[in-house]
Amino acid sequence: RTNSHLSKMLMKDSDQAMLHFVYNSQLVGAFVCHDGRKGEWVLQIPFFPPYQTMDDFSIGKVREMVWAGLGMDSNEANECDLDVLSIRPWTMSSLVAQSYVNKSNNMVLVGDAAHAFPPAGGFGMNTGLQDSHNLAWRLALLLRSSNHHMASSVLTKYESDRKPIATQNAALSVRNYNRTLQIAKACYLDAQHPELLTTVLGSPPMSLLPLETRQGMFRRLVRVAMMPLASLTSLNSSLHANHIERNVQSILESGGSLPLVFPKYEIGFSYEHGAHSKKEDASNDTKGYYPRMRVGYRLPHIILEVWNSSISHARDGWSVLETTSHEAEDPSDSLFITLTDISSQLRKVLSYDNPVFTLLVLGALPASSLTSIRQAIDKVSNKMNTPLIMANILPEAPSDEDNVSENIITLVDSQRVIWKLMSEESSDTADNPCNAMVIVRPDGNISSVEFVEEGKISTAVEKIISKGLESAV
């Protein structure tokens, strides 16, 4: 932890960054800023046991490494100071558990217990949070159910959802780690060289030498390998330093360094079966996110207006948006929300204690069809002991207020965004809004999408609802 003076120096606006990779003759490592204003930093340094021991990383030696990494001498630090809070070895790995659930269905792995990634890209914590998001509503469902078969299926589905994502993110983290090694190679440091050296020292005839002798040889060879990096901090220009600078500049300009934003993986991931069977192209890792109205994907962010009559009983609980893209005669009467977490919003608006599923009915329907849907919802929900709420999404505001039931949440997508996205998954077009039913899980992911003809809704709705709920649990 740095003191206040050093913290202010390190947090200058022009120098702020989360990761600082350092290559010089005294230190090769990475400074990770956890909270620069509080002076909380982590320094990651390569460690090669048994040829290095914890004696090589005493508090005094680590302090000297930190000062070397900051380009400062401890005797010249003046008012700057730091405390070394802990020194611990750890092994970087890329692992995903074989199973997330035990055979008795009374133990579930989440986060770091289920997977371990190289710390390159921040996917360890993000993947763990996604695990929890996927599992929380399942556990809530199980706690209120006496169906033992459901206990097995709902947790198995958690594993089939999350394990492919963890495997995908593990591979991405390894690719990201390899990207960080490109800068080291540009400095003529190869991560394979220390590994090769440890292999040689551990094999005959070198392995016949005493361990202390081999440890001394390893330390000397590492110092020799790092000596050329002294040219980088020399006041006198050198051909070697200029060459390294050009190498690094070329990597940075070509986008070969470590990116920190991965929309495709962070919010564009899918639980669709088989979605992760193909080997990912590393050149697409930073590809942008494109919303999909497709099974397995998270509901996209679409701005919807909550129609007044459907919220006369409750205004609290909605994720209200500040927007100027929609005009109303009286803005105070307009309520705009996002579709993304609709199940969570409806649970709060309607005061449900437990997570709920949502049935999105797209398109205008006669009252008789809506009644059939409500009856089917009640029947299937009671049978499966799973709460399901219906919301009707219309492409335009109702012309007759009397046709909007106070018992049905009515949302208006006047921009027809949802239909544009739906048209990309079917032959229907946004100009001719189709009738469809979309079942949304409590975590906001799409469980089923069914296009239906208006005249066949009453006969197909029960089957559609049952299929959508069963696929989720």
Image (cartoon, rainbow, N blue to C red):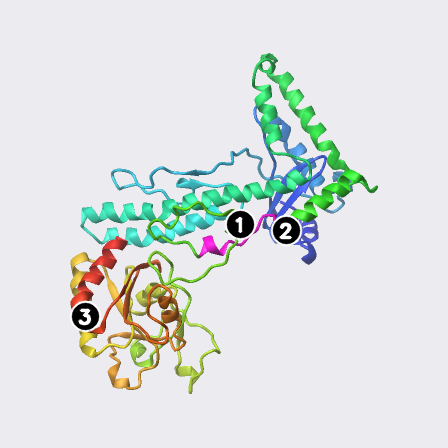
Mark 2 = which residue? Answer: 254
Q: Quick check: is 364 in the magenta stretch?
A: no
Residue 347: horizontal and vertical position, in percent? 31, 65
Identify the element where label 2 is drawn.
loop
* Boundaries of the magenta span: 252-267
Magenta span dominant secondary structure: loop
* The one of 423 and 132 positioned closer to us in this rendering: 423
Q: Quick check: is 266 in the magenta stretch?
A: yes
Amino acid marked by disc 1: Ser
Disc 1 from disc 3: Cα separation: 46 Å
Mark 3 = which residue? Answer: 456
Q: Mark 3 or mark 2: which comes first in sequence?
A: 2
Residue 354: horizontal and vertical position, in percent? 28, 59
Disc 1 from disc 2: Cα separation: 12 Å
* The one of 350 and 438 positioned closer to us in this rendering: 438
Amino acid marked by disc 2: Ser
Q: Residue furthest right?
A: 236
Position of 452 with respect to 6 (left or right) is left
* The one of 101 and 199 positioned closer to us in this rendering: 199
